Amino acid sequence: MNTPAYALAQETYAALGVDTEAALQKLQTVPISLHCWQGDDVSGSEHPDASLTGGGIQATGNYPGKARNLQELRQDLDRAISLIPGRHRLNLHACYADLGGQKIDRNQYTTAQFQGWIDWCKLRGLGLDFNPTYFSHPLAADGFTLSHKDAGVRQFWIEHGIACRKIAAEMGKQLGTPCVTNFWIPDGYKDTPVDRKAPRQRLEASLDAVFAEKIDPAFNVDAVESKLFGIGSESYVVGSHEFYMGYAVKNGTLLCLDAGHFHPTESIADKISSVLQFVPEILLHVSRGVRWDSDHVVLADDATRAIMEELVRGDFLGRTHIGLDFFDASINRIAAWVIGARDALKALLAALLEPAARLREAEDAGDYTTRLALLEEARTLPMGAVWDEYCVRQNVPVGPAWLDDVKHYERTVLAGRA
């Protein structure tokens, strides 16, 4: 039975031509790929007491209780997933390999080091996405990997990329859903370079070698991700937006747009319709930069809503893969997952509940007054009641009730890790 608040909201939306049931049904079909690295501050599992190093990225904060091993990380993920409505995916970095105490370098990884993750996802009905890890490694210490001047270093990272694509294909095959394998590298200079061309030529050749083997897209699809700058690469990033845009168009890969990888006032929402004119699909990393690519927890703010609105208005959901990418070590890490995922879904629901037909009618008629008025009225429509109804139907806590669960878990589980 529908809640009274939902019944009233349903009537309100219906008066504007919006079918709330259709919106909820659509929302249920859109998975969010939940990034594993929020749970341990991107430490990974390759070395005891490992921590994030290099790569132009940084986790800040020292909130107690972070996952110290794969068992704890999976336990924390289970708790977070139980509080997020819908059925979603796991986004895994290669540095979370299960090495079983062995010394195996990244270019020698096989499915065996990730079978535990595949089995874990299969048991929970989760899809799995993958990322080669081009940071926190001795051969990435000088800030260059696939564009490195040393052919031997480049070859190591090429082999890592090839290995990851094969692992990803097996992930997709076993789980029955394509794995999105995303390539991001930190390569760049802190200060202004003289030669911008040569590193990009080397990067293109390296990527061509990585992607040389054709893999059935039913099992794996490849994405390439740009960045404006990073710590230690403030002046020049080899894999710029223009580079990867050209590469994706030329080679038919997915293009990854990360909400924190552009100028602070630049929105990726405006890029979506342009990019999808020329590439088959896109990958979104939904994040929140504050002044820089600081990977703050996603909010249901104007920037996130603009992204989701563009996906819905352009009918792009079927060509878009949505993942989260943030890591905040200053707050409860499980709460960060839950807040970010629920806010991304709230923003998507708000987009699905727009009075789209009336807005298009006004725009097509040149009635921009009505368009603006309706857009503003939509901001205060009772979306919250529809969201609460969705949570009830998905058997997850309504409103802030999930926080009680997280606080209990903090007292009974996380406190013991201090």
Image (spheres, rainbow, N blue to C red):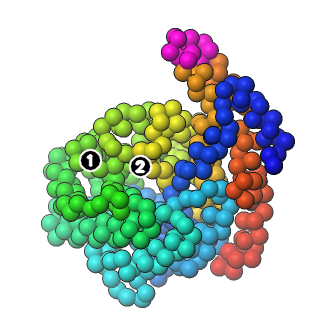
Residue 222, x across and y down, in percent: 32, 56
**Disc 1 target residue:** 252
**Disc 2 target residue:** 283
- The quadrant where residue 80 appears: bottom right
- The quadrant where residue 337 appears: bottom right
Work out whether mark 1 precedes mark 2 in sequence or the reverse, and give the earlier one: 1
- For the C terminus, the quadrant is bottom right
Query: Disc 2 marks which amino acid?
Result: Leu
Residue 365 painted magenta: yes
Q: Residue at x 59, y 18 (%)?
A: 371
Q: Is residue 20 above or below residue 374?
A: below
Label 1 sits on a secondary structure element that is loop
Q: Residue at x 55, y 67 (%)?
A: 125
**Distance from Cα at disc 1 to Cα at disc 2:** 13 Å
State left or right for residue 160 relative to residue 302: left
Q: Is residue 207 above or below residue 154?
A: above
Q: Nearer the viewer, residue 291 or 246?
A: 246
Q: Residue at x 75, y 65 (%)?
A: 405
Give neighbour class at mark 1: few <14, some 14-19, many 20+ (Cα, 10 Å).
Answer: some
Region rendered in magenta: 361-372
Q: Is residue 412 visible?
A: yes
Closer to the observer: label 1 or label 2? 1
Q: Is residue 310 above or below residue 50?
A: above
Query: Disc 1 marks which amino acid?
Result: Gly
Residue 363 painted magenta: yes
State left or right for residue 191 relative to residue 197: right
Disc assigned to residue 220: none
Most extreme residue toward the bottom is: 101
Label 2 sits on a secondary structure element that is strand
